[in-house]
Image (tube, rainbow, N blue to C red):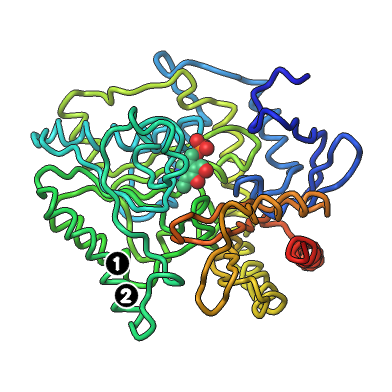
Amino acid sequence: MSKIFHRTSTQIPLEAVAGDGAYLIDQNGKRYLDGCGGAAVSCLGHSDEFVKQAMRDQLDKLAYAHTGFFTSAPAETLAENLIAHAPGDLDKVYLVSGGSEAMESALKLARQYFIDKGEPHRHKVIARQQSYHGNTLGALATGGNKWRRAPYAPMLFETFHISPCYEYRHRAPNESVEYYGKRAANELETEILRLGPESVMAFVAEPVVGATAGAVPAVEGYFKRIREICDQYGILLILDEVMCGMGRTGTLFACEQDGVAPDIMGIAKGLGAGYQPIGAMLCTSEIADTIRDGAGYFKNGHTYLGHPMAAAAANAVLHRLTQDGLVDRSKQMGVKFKAALQDRFGDHPYVGDIRGRGLFIGVEIVEDRETKEPFDPARKIHAHLKQKAMENGLMIYPGNGTKDGISGDHILLAPSFIITDDQIGELIDKLGQTFDQVFAA
Ligand code: PLP
């Protein structure tokens, strides 16, 4: 009997014993094409020699030094390189161990900024329904996913949620994309005015919503209007690029395609590409300088801040993404992949929507394409799809539909950027086989 608290207490998962490029291999030697990078993590596949060598080299020099005593060359290099590629005025980096820590730190940094700026009345956070910003209590409170929040509701600080920008379900039939984008963004202004502008601290959003909605990008113009509203009311824009960042959508950061830059940004998953657990929070010099001139230091900390081994791995990942052309490859292969999915499943009776950017694609499943009616969530279509796909040697990331019909079941496809044309063909064939088996039943 396994002594690990697995995701379900009734089923011990398969054991992964090796990685080989785009594939994972279990204890029986069965190969699984990783069609989702785990949870959009493994952007370089599972055996990248360049990253592995960088980690070995770093381990021979230095494994760990506490940031209360030292900085380290890999951490300094990573911060410089991230800033060199970051959008807008992002100018300081805080290196943590994952996405929840990055988002939790972002919330605390925003709060401390306003205290040090002399606006201590600002503490309210507005985010969106159908969002996920992490598992720790602050990040969980910020996310709008009801199912994940439910057991902890009494322990969560109060946050406020507006509608997501979700064209497939929320744009009215006769509404232009432009009008819809403005209408959806203007909900933020309405909410700010309702709460009292002087009390609002930040608006938090994923540029492309990942786990809770299945790769839903905003329509053009939405984030520009959001940025305007935040500026107008002196509110910080915190973008969560934990899942959609690091080249996943075809640009290093997803917000580049929306033409906006945040005040604070969280990244993780693709930053370590699965080789090390690492995340980062980036902020503007305006925020960093205000804190430097105020309290003098950010009142937050973790034992593994700026971990040298994790930073060395992330430097190598960033090199592969930016110097070896893998971000561009994500964009190019993403276009091919989406077209191939449209070709094969565009008319499928239970596929409502195929969307996303780069190699970050969502497929929403519905019972009725005309009315967009989701399947009854009790049927757990997403879970059946995941299980059958695994039997067929394919990993896909499942998402549940909601009882209130807010969205249907969906699957997230986020293969590594090294995926080949043949492997895309294999993925689509295995997905087709999976759909046939699940929907026949
Ligand atoms: N933010 C987003 C958008 C995520 O998708 C996730 C994880 O799925 C997180 C934050 C939390 O990241 P982690 O699981 O690394 O703590």
Q: State the mark number for residue 180.
A: 2
- Quadrant housing residue 429: bottom right
Rendered location of residue 98, percent (x, y):
50, 34
Q: Is residue 428 left or right of residue 141?
A: right
Does ligand 1 reach within 8 Å of label 2's beta carbon? Answer: no
Name which residue lies at 46% across and 72% down.
168
Measuring from the top left, give residue 396's x and y in whole percent: 68, 53
Q: Using the numbered discs, state the Cα–Cα distance from disc 2 to disc 1 in whole angstroms.
A: 6 Å
Identify the residue at image location x=37%, y=55%. 87
Is the residue marked by circle 2 packed among few (<14), some (14-19), or many (20+) residues within 10 Å?
Answer: many
Residue 116 seen by the camera: yes
**Tag of residue 389:** none
Circle 2 SS class: helix
Is 94 placed left or right of 269 in the picture? left
In this orientation, which residue lies closer to the viewer: 118 or 15?
A: 15
Helix, strand or loop under label 1: helix
The amino acid sitting under disc 1 is Ala
The answer to whether marks 2 and 1 mark residues whose Cβ atoms lie closer than 8 Å is yes
> In this view of the protein, which residue sits in the foreground, 372 or 310?
372
Q: What residue is at 59 percent from the left and 51 percent from the top?
A: 378
Pointer 1 residue: 184
